[in-house]
């Protein structure tokens, strides 16, 4: 007997806003005082925050994501129109000037409200700060299709990811670092795997490991360098003077690998004793 399928509704909702509607709410945000933006009442024009509040009242407990398409195209078209208007406004009598003003007003009303990119950014920041909701601005309808596909896939995979994270072992961290590095047949990934191996040592940062790997890009090259040394003391201190740089610009700092880590890496690379304790300080 076939098992019955069970459906679980995920809390994610993707809502598409028409460009004109979105721009209108941005324009209203510019006109409404900040203390009145949050709620929309009768006679008050709707803003992004009031729109989101109204939607969340209808779908409580959901996680809302907004998307708008061809916003950049809208802004570009209105910018080009505004640049053409001063050229047309050549005074040739008060009557003709009045006709031109009325014509421009009608064109403006027909094409929708005019907002700048700065107005859009301010309204989006205000929305995110007060509601935690972001708006995805997409260039065209194909981008919307790709985004909807990605959004749907992410929602569909969410239960499996939650189940995978529930390993039952508090000490087992299932993340990218613990899963290791993928190495293909061409050898891509070997350098990163070598760096990860060095990072296994106690008190070794990624910057320190990267400095060692830059000097000796493979374990074989490091082993060959050890063989060229004339004494064991020289081998133990071979990596000590490798510089480790952190940060960029005026905040950049520099230090050395140091003799302690140099000694530990030497012992790890050359010792045949599986019970050797490398970190004698702890």
Image: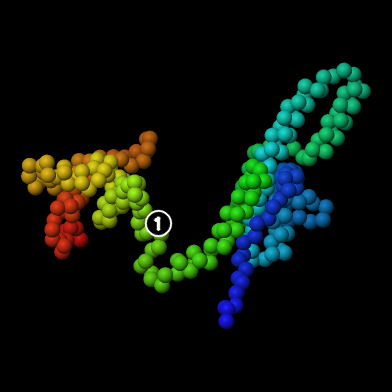
What is the residue that sits farthest to the top in this orientation? Answer: 92
Image location of residue 276, percent across then percent down: 15, 61
In the picture, measured across the screen, residue 31 lies left or right of residue 172, that is right
- Is any atom of residue 279 visible in this view? yes
What is the residue that sits farthest to the bottom in this orientation? Answer: 1
Image location of residue 51, percent across then percent down: 72, 55
SS category of the residue bearing label 1: helix
In the picture, measured across the screen, residue 59 lies left or right of residue 42, that is left
Give the crowd class for mark 1: few <14, some 14-19, many >=20 residues within 10 Å.
few
Q: Quadrant of residue 228?
A: top left
What is the residue that sits farthest to the left in this orientation? Answer: 231
Residue bearing the label numbered 1: 176
Q: How are the residues colored?
A: rainbow
22 shown above or below 76: below
- Is any atom of residue 130 visible in this view? no
Image location of residue 84, percent across then percent down: 76, 26
Residue shown at 55% from the left, 58% from the top: 154
All told, the count of numbered labels is: 1
Q: Nearer the viewer, residue 231 or 44?
A: 231
Image location of residue 110, percent across then percent down: 83, 38
Q: Quadrant of residue 174?
A: bottom left
Quarter holding the C terminus is: bottom left
Residue shown at 71% from the left, 59% from the top: 55
126 shown above or below 251: below
């Amino acid at each position: 007997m076939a098992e019955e399928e069970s459906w679980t509704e995920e809390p994610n909702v993707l809502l598409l806003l028409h460009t004109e509607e979105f721009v209108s709410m941005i324009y209203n945000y510019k006109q409404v005082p900040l203390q009145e933006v949050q709620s929309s009442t009768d006679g008050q024009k709707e803003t992004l925050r009031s729109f989101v509040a109204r939607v969340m009242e209808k779908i409580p407990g959901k996680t809302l994501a907004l998307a708008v398409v061809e916003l950049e195209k809208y802004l570009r078209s209105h910018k080009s129109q505004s640049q053409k208007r001063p050229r047309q406004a050549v005074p040739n009598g008060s009557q003709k000037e009045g006709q031109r003003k009325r014509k421009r007003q009608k064109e403006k009303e027909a094409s929708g409200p005019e907002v700048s990119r700065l107005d859009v950014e301010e309204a989006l920041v205000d929305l995110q700060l007060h509601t935690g909701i972001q708006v995805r601005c997409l260039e065209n309808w194909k981008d919307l299709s790709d985004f909807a596909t990605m959004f749907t896939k992410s929602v569909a995979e969410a239960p499996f990811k939650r189940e995978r994270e529930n390993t039952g072992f508090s000490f087992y961290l299932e993340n990218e670092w613990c899963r290791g590095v993928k190495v293909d047949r061409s050898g891509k990934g070997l350098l990163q795997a070598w760096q990860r191996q060095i990072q296994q040592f106690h008190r070794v940062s990624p910057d320190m490991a990267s400095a060692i790997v830059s000097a000796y890009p493979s374990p074989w090259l490091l082993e060959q360098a050890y063989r060229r040394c004339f004494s064991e003391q020289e081998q133990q201190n071979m990596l000590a003077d490798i510089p480790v740089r952190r940060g960029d610009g005026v905040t950049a700092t520099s230090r050395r690998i140091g003799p302690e880590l140099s000694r530990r890496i030497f012992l790890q690379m050359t010792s045949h004793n599986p019970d050797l304790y490398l970190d004698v300080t702890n």
